[in-house]
Structure formats: structure tokens, C-alpha cells
Amino acid sequence: MTETELREKVAAYTRFPPRGKLNIYADTTEFMSIQSDDILELGGVYYLVRGEEVEGRFGLDGEPKYWVKRVIDLGDGCSKIIKLVFHEKFLMQLGSLQIECFRSPLKEARILDKVRGDLRFMQGVNVLDSAGNQVRIIERIQGVRYYDQIHNLQMDHESYFHERFPAIFDNIVGCIEAINRLHEMGELHGDIRNDHILIERESGKYRWIDFDYTYDWAENPYGVDLYGLGNILLFTVGKGFHNLPDLTACGPEGIKMRSCLEPADMSLFFKHRIANLQKLFPYIPDSLNFILLHFSQGARVFYEHTDELLQDLRACRLDIASN
Amino acid sequence: MKEMTGSPGNKVLIAVDLSENSLKAVDYVGAMLSCHELAEITLITVIKEPSADIVPDEAERTRMVEEARSETLALMEQAASRLKALGIPEKHIRIKIQVCRKPMSISDLILHEQQDGGYGTLVVGRRGVSKKEEFLFGSVSSRVVRDAKHCAVWVIE
């Protein structure tokens, strides 16, 4: 495509076309140099860079992710996300433990290929740039983060549990089934969090995003993913996390409830987070609470495979429906 | 290396990770079996090959494995010396270093070796990992105890 043709495409798909020279990058190695209004040429397709993705946590603003560009595909005008190669090694906090975590473009690219067509996961294609960097071109999901969806529900817990929870539970079980599929393929998600599930606005589908984290593999390769799934379940059943300081802040009744809690009731990884939610909400069925207790300090047995967790979740479904 | 051909009842496989705890397991077995004239002991350790997702270059992964193998061999020979010092005849001691690649796990390899080699006794050290660590990373000794078949398992703590 000539520069003139490119400018025509840009003008067709944007309200504020760039002026001045168009910088076209076929080699994305120096991703910090790639700015808004630059063009990426990947696999014969041109993309206009609109900026970087920003990822915050728990509703807070975060840092820009310079290796993740927001783009417009100049072939069809669609908004997409392009993830460039950034090999990062860092310590990830899992509760009070730290583990060494690696960002792996190869892993994410491989998983994208394996889950193509499975809309429980973000969709995308993989392209090598002119320098051989593994670039992932992701279809943008228009929707809300699961964390925000639950956090913003304006209702008391008992109403939530009886009116909204059964359908949400079914969707979360669907998400866990998707993770189980990954595990059966010998893959990990690697960064299971409440804000890595997006609920697509149009379809209402729950979809996993961002699976580029990996770890030096351990005896049980699924432990880190199961840790994340446990947190999601606690969050879902509890309509948010419940911590000891929150109870104290509720006055005499909260303090009395706090006095009924023991160390065995608390999360294995977050000593102030309550895992035995039935003590707060007695209408939670035993079968469901039993699952949550696998993630508590009192647990004697842990789930080793996602399939084991799914079996227990399916077994408790009738108890939820009957409430 | 001379193959051990003794009966399973005399063949002992000690899984070591070269931690202080696993060397205690070596010492314990040496002390217990020094009076057993027919005991044949194999020390096995497992090197994990780095994941290709973390070290994409195959030549680099091979280099890292070979470096680990050299370091490990020296330490395994020291462990073997501890057995000799406790009275186990040198001809009854064998060293084995295995390389573990995904999707196999360390306990898979150890159990496979136990079956293949016809060992009647499998010895593992228990490191005493925290509950959190066991949840996240698993435990070789716990898996071996759970999944070992047709042998005795000694867990040394």
C-alpha cells in the first residue's frame, strides 16, 4: 500500500487523521518507540496505533502497557489489540507467597491457536513481524470486567444469592470448564483473576483474556490456576471478598460474628479473608461451602486438578437451585 | 554401569533432591541397611529441563541441563560416599540422573523408575513444605506415597 492509500484508509476510519510523516513499523522490537498515529505492518495488513492499553486492578487506574497497542485494522476498520513481544520476569504475589513469573508471548500465541473458535476465550491470530517477533493480534471484546459486574450489583447478599447467584454460578462454572479444557491440553492460563473475565455486552458470554503468564513448572502444574479459581469462587459466592476488618467496621454485630471465626475459616493465602462464608451467610448450602473450604487454612485436602473442582461444583448445583 | 540384578526385596531406590533433608534420607538408609549384605541401593535425582516458554532457545535449554547434570553428578557422588562411609559396599551403590521434560512430573519419573527397575523399596525425604506451597506447587513425597504400587515406601522426615 502506498502512503497515499494508507492516508485514505486512515481518513476513512478515523475522525482525526494524523498529519506529518507516517512512521511505518514492520519490526516491533522497539515497542517503546511505537507511538499513537504510527502504523504497524504485520502479515501484509496495516494497523493504525491509537495508544496503549492500561490495566488497573479493582477499578483503579494502572500503568500503560507499552507492549500492548490499541489499533485500528486499516483493512476493515475494526478496533483490535496488538500484543508485542516483551520478555519480562518478575515476582508475583500470591497472598503472602511470592513466585517467579515470566511473560511468554510464545505461550499466549500457542493458546490462541488452540482455542480458536472457542468463544470462552479471547480470539486472535499470530503473526511474525519482520524481525521474527511473535505478535498477537487480538479481537477486542466490548464488555465489562467480571469484577466490576459483581462489585457494582446494588443489592444485599441474601437477595443476590437467591435471585442472581444461580445464573452467575452457571457462567462461572462455564469459565472453569474452559480452564479445564486448557489443562487437558497441557496448558495453563497463568493469571486467573476476577478482572481477566470479560462479560461481552452483546452476547452476555463470559470470556477469558490475557494468558501470557507462565511459571517454572512444578510438581503440580495446575496449582497456580486453582489458586485463582478459588479466589474467583470466594468472590462470586460472597458477592465480593469479606475480610476481618470489614466485619469489625460493621459494629457490634460484626464484632460478634468475627468472634465466631477461627483461623481454619480463613483463606489459605489471605489470612484476613474469610473462606468459610456459611458462617456469614447461613443460607449457603453445605455442598457449596465444602468447596470453598478447600481453599481455607483448615483444608486437609486440596484440589489437584480442575476436574475435581468441577465435579464438586456440578454436584452442588441442585442445592443452589433449590434455595 | 553394572546393572543391579538382585531381587526386588533387596533393591532400594532413594529419590534425592540434594537438599539437606534428602541427604538425611541417604544417611538413614545407609545406617539401616549396612548390615544387609544383599541390599542394592540406587540414588536417583531428577533435573527439570526449563520450559520452552521461558527459555525458547533449544540449545540454551540443553546447555542449562548439561550444566545442571555436571553439578548434580558431583553432589550425587558425595551422597554415594556417605553410603560407603556407612558400610554399604561400593559395588552395591548406583547413581542415576534423569531429566524431566513436560508433561512428566518428578514423581512420575521416580515411580516409573521404581516400576521399571523392580525396586521393592522406594525412599523419599519429606521437606516439610507449607500448606500454601503444597497447594500451589504440589509435593513429590505426597504423590509418591499416594501413587506408588507394589513396593514399600519409606518417608524420611
Image (spheres, grey):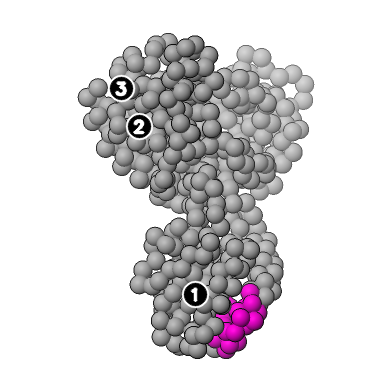
Which of the pair A13/B14 is nearer the observer?
B14
Image point 36% across, 45% down: which residue?
Answer: A307
- Residue A97 falls in which quadrant of the image? top right
**Magenta segment:** B79-96
Q: Are marks 2 and 1 in contact (CB under 8 Å)?
A: no
Q: Amino acid at mark 1?
A: Leu
Pointer 3: what residue? A283
Q: Chain of mark 1?
A: B
Q: Quadrant of the N terminus of chain B?
A: bottom right
Instruction: Reply yes or no: does residue B44 show up in magenta.
Output: no
Is residue B81 shown in magenta? yes
Q: Give the left or right position of residue B146, taking residue A110 as reference.
A: left
Left or right for A240, reference B53: left
Residue at the spot x=56%, y=22% of the render? A58
Q: Label 3 is placed on what type of residue?
A: Tyr
Residue sitting nearer the eye, A119 or B119: B119
Q: Are marks 1 and 3 on the same chain?
A: no
Q: Amino acid at mark 2?
A: Asn
Residue B124, given in percent of the width and then of the height, sits at 51, 66
Q: Is residue A271 above or below residue B131?
A: above
**How far across and how far down the image is residue B70, in percent?**
69, 72
Separation of residues labelled 1 and 3 (CA atoms)? 52 Å
Q: Nearer the viewer, residue A260 or B116?
A: A260
Q: Give the chain of mark 2.
A: A
In the foreground, A134 or A228: A228
**CA distance for labels 3 and 2:** 10 Å
Q: Secondary structure at mark 2?
A: helix
Residue A289 marker: 2
Query: What residue does disc 1 label?
Result: B13
When the figure is inspected, residue A152 is found, relative to residue B28, above or below; the finding is above
